[in-house]
Image (cartoon, helix red, strand yellow):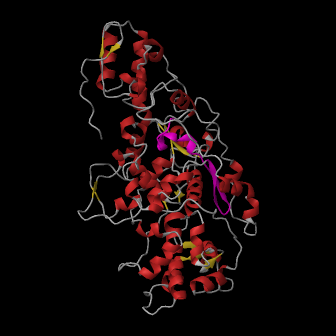
Amino acid sequence: MDKHPAGPRDCTVLTRQAEHRSSWLWDGPPTGQAWPGVLTCRHRFSCMPEVGLDPRVAAYITDAGLGGLLHVPNIEIDHALITALVERWRPETHSFHLPHGEMTITLQDMEVIMGVPVEGLPVVGKTNMEWGNLCHELLGHKPPDKEPHANENTAMLCGARLKLSWLKTMFHDPLPADATDLQVQQYARYYILEMLGGMLFMDKSGERISVMYLQFLNPISNGKKYSWGSAALSWLYRHLCKASETTAKQIGGALLLVQIWAYARFPHICPMMRHPHQALPSGPLAVRWKVATCTTEHATHVLSAYRMSLASLRPNQIVWEPYKSVIGSLPSYCTAGQHIWRSTVPLLHFWVVEGHHPERVLRQFGMKQGVPVDVNTSTDLHNITLQGKHDKDWAVEHASPIAKWAAHAEVVNAPIFEGEMGFDDEYMKWFRRITRRFITKETSYWDTLVESHLRILAMCEPGSAIHIECMSALEAVEELSRLNLDNARVASNTSEPAAGHGQLVGGRRGHRGRHSGDGKVRPDKEPVRRRKRE
């Protein structure tokens, strides 16, 4: 048997496996360290007025290019689901490694699900401004100075991070009916800061928001010049990468996007939604989960259940293109940047630079996936933080990636692909070699049993009682797919595990076939019962 069943067998891609939380989950943590558990997911509900946002304020938010966020509903974050996905996130490739290949969250997902613009200037600006004065100028309120000798954490304004409770107090009262245009813009900037800080750029602090974004909102209409979506995706990638480390305990970023992304692509792990009878309001795809009622048909908030669901994914449980049937009904701002959705570009957010690699997930765009070229998700870039670097000019520091973002020179393309990728596809053979097959030992048990049966088949005489019993067992659990056209070769090939359960050679599934005394799998004249689609 393979002495290293979890993988990877070829370590040229996943070069940081020793630092990944899946190492501790499989081998156990070092003495004195705790097992990686459920991550604390930092998320904050929107504080929109119960009576609805004043239309004068909403008009300015829309003018800033962020009107889509006004429609994104408040949804409880499933910490266990986010954790299960983080366990499969690889900082080396900026993608989730799943049984049937890589998947990731792209610029398309950001724009379609959240309604945030992805085209425009990168969100790269100053990090050393007089933030108190800027608040006074653009919000109409200046945070009180820190008391002498007081702890830095007690200050209302700590660097560019402002206590949200104080800011909420300043804008607690409704906008007056006779408010000036200046006041309306101040309220609009407040709600923009609250939405950006709570839905897109959440950090590990639940009580502060950044006021750095104010510099892009003077005048407020300047906001529409910027690619808020690419900045939010960069920030999310950084948090996913950091959270995948062995000792990580929490995660920030656009976690609502991650959750809805998973719901759309893996419906079998999505809570069954019973929508109200009234029509849903117009807005980005996230609106479809507004005021939906979760039922109990699916195990939610249970990490072990999510681990098992992701480990045993069948091809028919993956929706590679979940937006095909609905994209025409979405507002135009959800597709405005579609010409750059497949751009291989750096994503920027001030000091953060992360690579966008749609070439690794072409099936998400309905295209044929080949073996991708190596990517450089630089550890040096991953290690850049703002600490001690507030005076840096990030536009100069990141001049090269900014130029690459502006050019969008590399938009990947490939032949159209439909159906399911075969078990013996060159991509799948490569992927099984370089990926981390299992996260925990519990998620490996099924494959261990199936592969044991395959090894027994290779050792016994075709037509013998043992051979027939093994074939019958594999047929009963819909795992005859593990037998290649060359039965003997695959049955003895313990280094080529299957990509997932229930996938037949050539990408078909559900047709069981029959076995005969010569050990060959024969197709039945009529397909036997198909597994009910989940």
Residue at the farthest bottom position: 178
Question: Where in the figure is residue 337, as x and y percent of width and height?
Answer: 53, 57
Q: Residue at x 42, y 16 (%)?
A: 485
Residue 314 appears anywhere in the view: no
Residue 178 sits in which quadrant?
bottom left
Asked if residue 228 lies left or right of residue 316, the reply is right
Asked if residue 224 lies left or right of residue 257, the reply is right
Q: Residue at x 43, y 36 (%)?
A: 443
Asked if residue 422 lies left or right of residue 406, the reply is left
In this orientation, which residue lies closer to the viewer: 134 or 418?
418
Question: Where in the figure is residue 12, as x and y percent of width and height?
Answer: 65, 33
Question: Where in the figure is residue 7, as x and y percent of width and height?
Answer: 55, 32
In this orientation, which residue lies closer to the viewer: 87 or 25?
87
In this orientation, which residue lies closer to the viewer: 211 or 405?
405
Q: Which residues are magenta?
A: 344-368
In this orientation, which residue lies closer to the viewer: 425 or 223?
223
* Number of dots carrying numbers: 0
Residue 389 appears anywhere in the view: yes
